[in-house]
Image (tube, coloured by chain):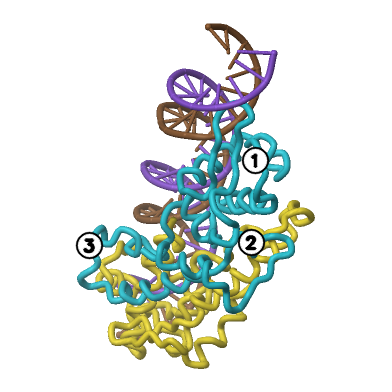
Chain colours: A yellow, B cyan, C purple, D brown
DNA sequence: CTATTCCGTACTAGGTTGGTCCTAATTTAG
DNA sequence: CTAAATTAGGACCAACCTAGTACGGAATAG
């Protein structure tokens, strides 16, 4: 089983390419060429990332995209959440009142805890750490861990 | 985004029902009624779980299914792996030589680490802990953590 | 004004998922 | 020995979701 969708995977790649050059503003087409991904798909991804507040888009001629915040302040969890929606292990961990099994399903409360662990794992890694030279710390910096409770439903 | 497929979710429910009464042997139909899930689907799940060595099936009249091992020695990761296949965050974390982006994709090595964290999180919880009275320990018992490297691809 | 670029939305082909069903193999009961 | 019950292992199909494309509209620089 693959956890991330292909689009979410691409989204992280695209965001990482933006994080590599924080101050430049690059057009969707140029970024697609750089990341070697289909142009239309990258455009779609950037729109989703802009909607999620990860990147900032400038319209018009000489427009383009840029990272909305510092790369170290953007977690991988935020990127995938902007594309695939909120992260949850099971259906009932996302929209809570939707499952009529709630009354007799004994596993539900336990999933909650697992959900948090997975969410924290993704939230603990920032875009800066995904860069080629980025370190993957056992004890992540504070600004990355802060986002964990924002993702946990 | 939902990480577990509905079938994997059901699989854990079914396995948990078996774990609740370790010594009884129950038929697929009876278990489906107990778990309030479609009979045919439960039968399919049990076949997959038997193939993965989680449950043991006895054929013939008075046949049925039973947990193959102690509930405390079966991790949630094993159950979902038996149904959905090996757990991986991205495509390239499962079948490694399949991605031609390997040469220039800088995110790949970092996914590996995230992959391990998620796999460990699922491997750290045993079926016994998913039972109604089961405790979710911060430091899981040794027999549950052992399975983590079996899942990590 | 015009060219360029982002924005929003609609659309489609393909694959995966959830679910059913059928046949063969195996075991017990009578 | 025969019949019933049950697992084992497929094939099979409809429904949904995913990935990718396309088009019209809005904003901005020159």
The residue tagged with tag 2: helix, strand or loop? helix
Q: Is residue B27 above or below residue A84?
A: above
Find out whether the residues at labels 3 and 2 contact each other: C-beta distance under 8 Å: no
The residue most toward the right is: A103
**Disc on the earlier residue, 3 or 2:** 3
To which residue does mark 1 refer? Answer: B25
Task: Check the residue under mark 3 and report the chain it is in.
Answer: B
* Residue that appears at 61% across and 51% down: B15
Q: Which residue is outermost to the bottom?
A: A142
Rendered position, B28 above or below B130: above
Tag 1 or tag 3, which sits nearer the N-term? Answer: 1
- Residue B128 numbered mark, or none: 2
- Asked whether residue A62 appears in the rendered view, the answer is no
Q: Which mark is residue A118?
A: none
Q: CA distance from mark 3 to mark 2?
A: 42 Å
Quarter containing the C terminus of chain B: bottom left
Q: Position of residue A140 (x, y in %)?
A: 46, 89
- Residue B26: image quadrant is top right
Q: Locate residue A75, reporting x and y percent.
A: 48, 81
B113 or A63, which lies in front? Answer: B113
Q: Where is residue D15 shown, x and y percent of the image? A: 57, 39
Q: Residues within 10 Å of mark 2 (few under 14, many from 20)?
A: many
């Amino acid at each position: 089983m693959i956890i991330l969708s292909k689009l979410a995977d691409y989204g992280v790649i695209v965001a990482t390419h933006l994080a590599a050059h924080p101050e430049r503003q690059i057009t969707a087409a140029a970024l697609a060429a750089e990341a070697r991904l289909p142009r239309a798909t990258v455009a779609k991804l950037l729109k989703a990332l802009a909607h999620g507040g990860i990147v900032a888009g400038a319209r018009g001629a000489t427009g383009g995209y840029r990272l909305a915040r510092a790369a170290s302040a953007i977690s991988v969890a935020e990127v995938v959440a902007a594309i695939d929606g909120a992260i949850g292990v099971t259906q009932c961990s996302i929209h809570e009142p939707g499952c009529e099994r709630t009354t007799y399903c004994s596993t539900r409360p336990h999933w909650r805890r697992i959900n948090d662990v997975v969410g924290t794992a993704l939230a603990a890694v920032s875009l800066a750490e995904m860069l080629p030279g980025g370190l993957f710390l056992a004890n992540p910096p504070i600004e990355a861990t802060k986002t964990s409770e924002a993702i946990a439903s």
